Amino acid sequence: MNESVVQNPVVASYLEELRLRAEPLPPTRREELLLEIRSHIATTLPPEASEAQVRQLLDRLGSPEEIMNAELDDVPATADTGRAAVVPSAAPLRWRELTGLALLLLGGAVLPPVGYLTGGVLIGLSRRWSPTARVLLVALPAVIAVMVMVEMIRNGQWYTPADLVAAPRTTAGAFLDFGLDVLPYTAAQVLALIAVWLFPRIGAGVTKGRDR
């Protein structure tokens, strides 16, 4: 095994990127994956490998993002597999996730709390974020929103389905006002979800907090 080859700047950069992208995985599986890739590189490349040989091997292995996609797609996320139920942070958001974020942000002005909760369901069903991130950034705010709405209904401070039929413009205006009132909170929630998606270290920190 040619361990010295992993000190090659190109290899070292590749392994570092893989390490960052793999941080959302459970610690045991993360270490196994990194060791597998490192060992494969060390045993395949000859001593004093040229840059062309290094890049050719890394191209065959695939980018760190592709490795993580394969890691998460091969086996469904279950308690038995120990795999993290997330998609690599840098992978593009799909239409369902974009719709979910939009509804989380503006759902309070569409049909509260239905619009907002629909956005929460769309994000909750996505593997883009870790289970812990979805609990803290989606489920918990949704529970709080429902509790607030129930209290408003009990106190007669909210509109009923009959109001939607009898005075649709007035009701729609009330929904818009409500959506503007809660916009700072929903914007903070959406920005937090985007930050976890964009930066692997943030998502990894949330996951690590769960694993301890």
Image (cartoon, grey):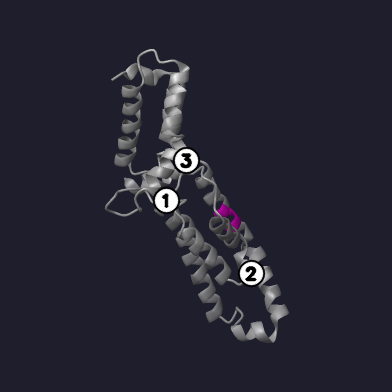
Residue 205 visible? The answer is: no
Q: Which mark is residue 200?
A: 3
In the rendered image, residue 21 lying in the magenta stretch gets the answer no
Secondary structure under the numbered disc 1 in the rendered image:
loop
Earlier sequence position, callout 1 versus callout 3: 1
Residue 161 found in image quarter:
bottom right
Magenta stretch: helix, strand or loop mostly: helix
Q: Which mark is residue 64?
A: none
Magenta part of the chain: 186-190
| Identity, as a three-letter code, of the amino acid under mark 1 | Ser
The structure residue drawn at horizontal position 43% and vertical position 28%, both measured from the top left corner, is 58
| Identity, as a three-letter code, of the amino acid under mark 2 | Val
Secondary structure under the numbered disc 3 in the rendered image:
helix
Q: Rate crowding at label 2 as few (under 14), some (14 to 19) or many (20 or more) other CA atoms within 10 Å.
A: some
Q: CA distance from mark 1 to mark 2?
A: 28 Å
The structure residue drawn at horizontal position 62% and vertical position 57%, both measured from the top left corner, is 184
| Residue 149 at x, y percent in the picture | 54, 73
| Nearer-the-camera pick, 32 or 55 | 55
Image quadrant occupied by the C terminus = top left
Earlier sequence position, callout 1 versus callout 2: 2
Earlier sequence position, callout 2 versus callout 3: 2
Return the residue at label 1: 130
| Residue 45 at x, y percent in the picture | 36, 20
| Nearer-the-camera pick, 116 or 36 | 36
Return the residue at label 2: 110
